[in-house]
Amino acid sequence: MKDVAKDAHVSVATVSNYLNGKKVRPEVEEQVKRSIEKLHYVRNDAARALKISESKYVVFVLPTVWSPFFAELTFWIQRYLNEKGYKMILSISENKYEQEKSYVKMAEEQRVAGIISISYSDLNSHVPSNIPLVSIEKDDTGMFPLVTSDNYGGGRMAADEFKRRNLRHVVYIGTSHEGFSPMIARQSGFVDQCNNLGMKYEVFSVPSARTPEKFNSAVEEISSEIAGIFKKSGPVGVFAYCDETALHLRNQLEKDGVRVPEDIQIIGFDGGMIYVNTALGISSIRQNVQEIALKTTELLDSQIKGKTSEDVRRFMVPVSFKEGNTTVN
């Protein structure tokens, strides 16, 4: 900064004012601009944050961007952080616990403004309570604010949609990951509503799609089971815990010669957008991604500014049913 001031023939304070968006005379502004370009000056924001004890960086920890839901969520999180004057540091964990912890350590060392996390481990138990953090989908500590979709209500909604289509036999396909509360809620909502409506149901589970061979093998077996149910009982409704599983099942059923949606109707969960205003095509329980991102960034901003109450907030975002080509309209 001193070199810029010397080259522009102005004081260091004037350069500082310009860099921080304060008013300087137009002719002086041009001088400073020319000197910055000439000297290729780049401000060290990390050092500045340490000096003034204020950071504008937020670490966003998430498992992957290889899904429409996570990609769309990342877009909106960054959009709302930018509107609030923050910069997002995207940290993809690939569901690796040690990787997640390393991002928390980095956040501590760099004294970032806060953390937004989507973690299916007990990551939050390693985050110091003085670091502003908001969790999406899961927080078992009770220490940090949580934003989640109405997973239980989404399960009930899927059962209702099958009932409206006069399906008497339905199937739920969940994950074999035990203890993951959003998935448990989706299954519980579906099963409870099936019982309320007098619908016969079966429950299957698949391993994570991150183990492709095991996942594909499980989908093949389930497709065969569902085809057998169809032959005995007629049309079947299938509610899959995520769109990815719903898509794989549809493809496998069609390979097996079963028609979708004429014989088997499928509803997924997420309702992700592959392009702006373009859904995946399958019927799905749609998470309101934009609202999740808005509430998350609002809660984090309030924490950073010390405006939160002592009560840790839990915010549940409503879901909706989006008709696609895997259910009969």
Image: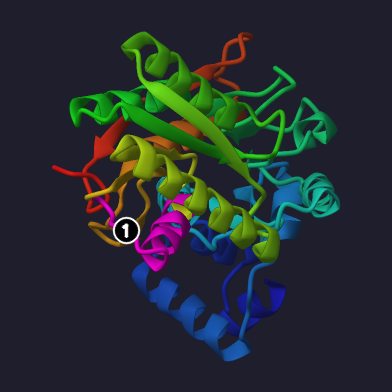
Decide: is 157 above or below 259. Answer: above
Task: Tell whether 166 sits left or right of 144.
Answer: left
Q: Residue at x 45, y 55 (%)?
A: 249
Q: Residue at x 48, y 52 (%)?
A: 223
- Magenta-colored stretch includes residue 129: no
Of 210 and 99, which appears nearest the observer?
210
- Magenta-colored stretch includes residue 257: yes
Instruction: Please name the predominant secondary structure of the magenta segment in the image.
Output: helix
Task: Tell whether 138 sits left or right of 328.
Answer: right
In the current view of this chain or complex, which residue is farthest to the left? 329
Q: Position of residue 65 (x, y in %)?
A: 55, 60
Q: Position of residue 51 (x, y in %)?
A: 76, 49
Q: Residue at x 41, y 26 (%)?
A: 155
Q: Is residue 307 visible?
A: yes
Decide: is 170 above or below 113. Answer: above
Q: Which residue is mark 1?
A: 280
| Extent of the magenta region | 245-261
